[in-house]
Amino acid sequence: MAGQPPADADYSAEPTKDPITTETSAAHEIKADNAKSGGDAALNLLKESGGVHRVVDSETNKRLLRRIDLHIMPLICIVYFLQYIDKTAISYASVTGILESTHLHGNQFNWVASIFFFGQLAFEFPTIRLIQLFPLAKYVAVNVTIWGAVLASLAACKSYASLLVCRFLLGAAEAAVVPAWVIFTSQWYTKNEQAFRVGIWFSVCGAAQMFGGYFAYGVANHVGGDVNAALKGWQVIFLFLGLLTAVVGISFWFIMPDSPEFAGFLSAEEKALHIERIRSNEQGIGSRVFKWDQFWEAVTDPMTWLYAFWIFAANIPNSIATSFGNILVKGMGYTSKESLLLVTPLGAYEIVALVGLTYIAMKKEQRLYACIAGHIPAIIGAILMATTNKTPALIGYYLSGGIPIGWTTILGLQASNVAGSTKKITVSVIGTIAYTVGNIISPQTFQARDAPRYLPAKISIVILYFLITVDLFIMRWLFVRRNKERDQERETQGDSYKVEENHEFFDLTDLKNREFRYAL
């Protein structure tokens, strides 16, 4: 995130000129006040317009949006693609020889799958501070490079213990991804644009699932059948994906800007216009100052825990798409090689559901209703998995791909409906902790004694899918209520109601800023 000028900075000198404009006394005061108060970094960019509002016409807005999409979205999507396939590579390894090579038995594979999330959980709270302390893109780049190296190192594992260590470190390195992606989205896009963009970058998980299945199938055919091969199939998978991720991590350092303030692809004029573009978000582009009052507000806000419950409960069944996807499909009556191909349509359905429903949500401005619409087929699918076998069960498995629309909705709401830099990071981190705890529990619901159908796990999935759908209705009710209360406050005060100039960039939380309205 953008840096703040030091608190003791000297602003008494004559303001310097730039190619766009001379810094006015009003803008001069904005910078000084911002340094002292820990306000949002967007205030620094307002100097380009002298601290006053600027009109951004629709054509200029479209041009800026196209440029941002071209420079920001590809790299965000690529890294999110890799983080998904890298953590689920253990599933492909499970049917390409890792169990035999490392002598795993009983529920040991379950713990190899789960330990990743212990690593992620252990590093989430340090992430709250580190993600503000360091330039955002640079911090992410270092983490991506480290997890690529760790993933490649999994190819050298020969025992249960070594697998546990590497998977733990892999989880720790991936801890920053979700909080960082929420911040990137809120920095670069307006509220109305955010839901669809989250849908796009999250939908690459479906693409990763498809690519991973086909890639693992190819490895199983061409390496798995060669008894003289220097490397086993699972080792090839870890080496290829790990080295690819490390290269992308290094590229991220040089290509991705830490915030709009440091975007080399935007001119000074375009940066100022972008700040006006996102003014209606009521939350700016972020502050590096950690604020304890925002931290405690995040902890005590009921919405934080409604988000967290959805994430926790929805991720308990997550093993059906990650660590246990191939094993579960095998249990429906298919072979190991068939399972590598048969899991891939889940990814295709996920892409269609995510992009389609988030696009509808953007056009209709009804995120939560669109999300609920995606949950209904998933509930039906969970019932089919629990009550049928072979083809009907497989169809039910594919329908469960609608649940990630909820994950994208929650991430989008954290970007749009949580204001205050420290509060946003805290809420996102609490959500990621809920995600890790749900995923720690997830493999343990698939006990070896329940193989091959895993009926108790499937019944729990039906119940959890119903509960998270109810949770979405409660979220929407609370948002509507808060918006109505603020509208009534404004109506009651009438002409005496005053809006403070540039309040959008004071780094206020959504509860403190009474001009803030929640996206539904």
Image: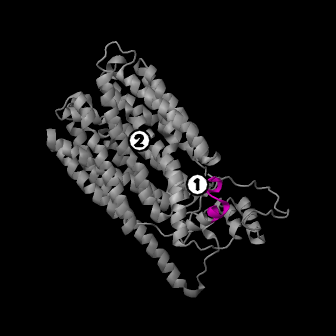
Q: Which residue was labeled with disc 2?
A: 437
Find residue 387 and report its image quarter. top left
Which element is circle 1 on?
helix
Determine if residue 473 is in view: no
Q: Which residue range is magenta in the image?
A: 260-272
Where 298 falls versus 334 (above or below)? below
**Is the C terminus in the top left, top right, bottom left or bottom right quadrant?**
bottom left
Say left or right for 273 vs 115.
right
- Residue 510 lies, in percent from the top left, at 53, 65
Which label is found at residue 422? 1
Identify the amino acid type marked 2.
Val
Task: Say if residue 329 shows up in the picture.
Answer: yes
Q: Is residue 468 above or below residue 460?
A: below
Residue 483 x, y percent position in the rendering: 45, 72
Prevailing SS of the magenta stretch: helix
Picture quadrant of residue 268:
bottom right
Q: Residue furthest top?
A: 228
Left or right of residue 179: residue 230: left
